[in-house]
Amino acid sequence: MSISASQPPSRNRASGSGLPTVTDRLVEANARYAAEFTDPGMDARPVLKVAVVACMDARLDLHAALGLQLGDCHTIRNAGGVVTDDIIRSLTISQRALGTRSVVLIHHTGCGLLDLTEDFRHDIEAEVGQRPAWAVEAFKDLDQDVRQSMQRVRTSPFLPHTDDVRGFVFDVTTGRLREIDPRP
């Protein structure tokens, strides 16, 4: 991303150094994008009626990896791509209000949650004086965690469409998906 040399330092609220922040660069990039933007006239309902739940890892370019275009799917991301209450909330809205019928779950090799434990929460509590209300949802076995996530989707009473729920592990070194059998 290029940064305009004529950008006034007053826009750099967070850095205090007069240098552009990452957010300043993103806002600048958006201005360029918006200047050429044409409303595609799409509905909020995904064309393919699929919701993809995946890890927030920056190495996963889901649209490219799955051959998706803008408007094809709902993309729901969190740390680890694990199915939490908030993922169920998003999937419920996706299915009941916006017409999705299929759910694709994607974990990946080299995930940061493989190295964390619930001690992460305890460390935060010791630092800030308050225990986070959320669980870390760390795991040691990718395949088993994908199975657990599939089971959470399939058994949720809030989701009316649980017949087409499939889980995968994305290999960050090859770009390939490996499907996980829901049975151990």
Image: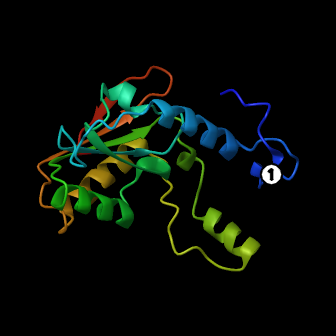
Residue assigned mark 1 = 10
Figure check: 156 above or below 36: below
User: How far across and how far down the image is residue 93, in percent?
Assistant: 25, 61
Say which quadrant the C terminus sits in.
top left
Q: Which residue in the rendered view is the most extreme toward the right?
A: 17
Q: Residue at image x 25%, y 49%? A: 44
The answer to whether 87 appears left or right of 138 in the picture is left
Three-letter code, disc 1:
Ser
Q: What residue do we see at 50% from left, 22% from top?
A: 173
* Horizontal side of residue 32 vs 98, given as left or right: right
Of all residues shown, which one is farthest toward the bottom? 129
Residue 166: percent from left, percent from top: 23, 42
Task: Using the rendered view, name the quadrant where residue 89 is placed.
Answer: bottom left
> Element at badge 1?
helix
Residue situated in front as seen by the camera: 159 or 6 = 6
Q: How is the image coloured?
A: rainbow
Task: Please name the residue shown 59% across and 35% down the image.
Answer: 29
94 is higher (above) or lower (below) than 164:
below
Q: How many marks?
A: 1
In this rendered view, identify the residue nearer to me: 91 or 126. Answer: 91
Residue drawn at 30 percent across, 29 percent down: 68
Q: Residues within 10 Å of mark 1 (few under 14, many from 20)?
A: few
Drawn side of residue 18 relative to residue 83, left or right: right
Q: Nearer the viewer, residue 76 or 167?
A: 76
Image quadrant where one finds the N terminus: top right
